[in-house]
Image: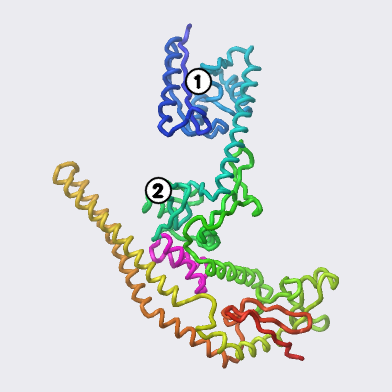
Amino acid sequence: MTEKNRVALYLRLSKEDQDKLQKGDDSASIQNQRLLLTDYALERDYEIVEVYSDDDESGLFDTRPDFERMLRDAKLGKFNIILAKSQSRFSRNMEHIEKYLHHDFVNLGIRFIGVVDGADTANYGNKKSRQINGLVNEWYCEDLSNNIRSAFKAKMKAGQFLGSSCPYGYVKDPKDHNHLIIDDYAASIVRRIYYLYLQGNGKAKIGRILTEDGILIPSRYKREVLGIRYHNSHELETTKNWSYQTVHTILNNEVYLGHVVQNKHSNLSYKDKKHVLQPKEKWIKVENQHDPIIDAETFRQVQERQKIRTKAVNNEQRDNSIFSGILVCADCKHTMVRMYERRGKHEFIGFCCKTYKTQGKKACTSHAINYEQLKNVVLEAIKKEARQILTPEDINGFNGVEYASNLKADYMVQILQIEKEMEQKLKYKKLTYQNYMDEVISKAEYLSYIKEYDADISELQSKLDHVNTQIEEQSDLESEYHKWEESFKNYINIDELTRDVVLELIEKIEVNDDGSISIFYKFQNPYVEICHADE
């Protein structure tokens, strides 16, 4: 041997391996591979130049950290032999076997040896057996993937929560990690988001309110408060602000009703890490699996309000009607669309059924209605019905007084959380002083730590002062909501119908074929039949 062979040892263990039965087996299995390969190299007088080890990494993918580092070093010529326990330790993907063992390594002058299974690229005679083993390994992964998916789906159908991270507002039950329990502090923020939305705040504005109040975004809350190792791929290190999307997700997540909804995404295949959204009919939903944070009626109101706001936004540029998103055909239940004069200036005059307009009278009739007449009829109906439908006994919707009370209780939960954090910081501060006195840390380190703790305590005190101010503002909120209810009685005297009034009082308006309309209020009375103004 003119030149000593320089070898790299490659070790890998993954969750798909049958020998990984317990969490404690990880290091032992990797260590066993290292000992086996080291003995093999020393017996043949090989020089070990580097050891590459990937733990908890699937052999199907070549995006393993140390695997990638090994490939970079291979191109730099750091070694001319790669040792692995077997070909399957190197890769379980047939494409990678062909790419690396039979192409790239050949061009780089690198020999691959599988110690246990006899794979050796220097022996051309066993190339076919290497390829067959590659296929067998890949089939094994495919079968294993299908078995795991079947097991996961069975657990999902049983209502077990399988997510690696809990939705904001919940934590995993210490007694059962497939069950969710409420995190009181985060749950109070979730309730506040729903409350703010029903008050009329948009999602972006809610995000600004939470950010200004110093509420940690969910990902930072999980890391900094709950101590969870959590990573959001869409989050930058500098991200501190609540986003529109985060608020939107919270407002539409049925987990807050106590339901578990899973199987929303799936991999394209067992060899591809890319997630794709599943159609809703494939989602697995199991109701009433944990304590709800939001009641069903509040959730329903939020969904309905979103539909109205979305339609209003979509039509903003082409339809300034105060009835956008509310006016529907009584027969086909589709929305009404704008109707214009056929002659003259082709001005907007009213609405007709969308089905009729796009598919003709065989699908539905016109249900035509004049815009100005519609406004007058609805205005008179509200003036007539306001005093009856807006009494406290008749209201069947968002309970402002109850929410004011709940919000105050949620603020108290926030105070307890902040005080707990302050107490912890003060404890650390005292321990730091004791460490300094015991000469465990230097004076410079002591001053640095104290400065950091003082800054944290000052920030927590500011948050505490802010929450206390909000509690003071809530003290009169119940009486304010009584005034709010009383103010609706003034609608009996209103002279002009506005979109705000329509959205506040009316769920929807159905236009009947005979020229009458049915108004569905947001209160106990299901609807009021009203004849058209020109009859």
Q: Specify the label residue 174 is tagged with.
A: 2
The residue nearer to you, when weighing 112 against 130, is 130
User: Dot 2, how many residues are within 10 Å of its Cα: few (below 14), some (14-19), or many (20+)?
Assistant: few
Name the side, left or right, on which 63 lies relative to 347: left
Picture colour scheme: rainbow
Q: Around disc 1, counting alpha carbons within 10 Å, would you say few (fewer than 14), some (14 to 19), or many (20 or more)? A: many
* Residue span colored magenta: 186-215
Which element is circle 1 on? loop
| Quadrant in which residue 419 is drawn | bottom left
- Count up the numbered dots: 2
Front-lying residue, 78 or 135? 135
Q: Magenta-highlighted stretch: main secondary structure? A: helix
Kindly identify the amino acid type of the residue bearing the numbered disc 2. Answer: Pro
Disc 1: which residue? 85
Between 388 and 227, the one lying in front of the other is 388
Compared to residue 444, the image places residue 495 above or below, namely below
Magenta region includes residue 65: no
The quarter of the rendered structure image containing the C terminus is bottom right
Of all residues shown, which one is farthest toward the right?
362
Residue 511 shown left or right of residue 26 in the figure: right
x and y percentages locating residue 507 in the rendered image: 62, 76
The image quarter containing residue 370 is bottom right
Secondary structure under the numbered disc 2 in the rendered image: loop
Q: Is residue 526 above or below residue 58?
A: below
Residue 204 appears in the rendering:
yes
Q: CA distance from mark 1 to mark 2?
A: 38 Å
In this picture, residue 474 sits left or right of residue 113: left
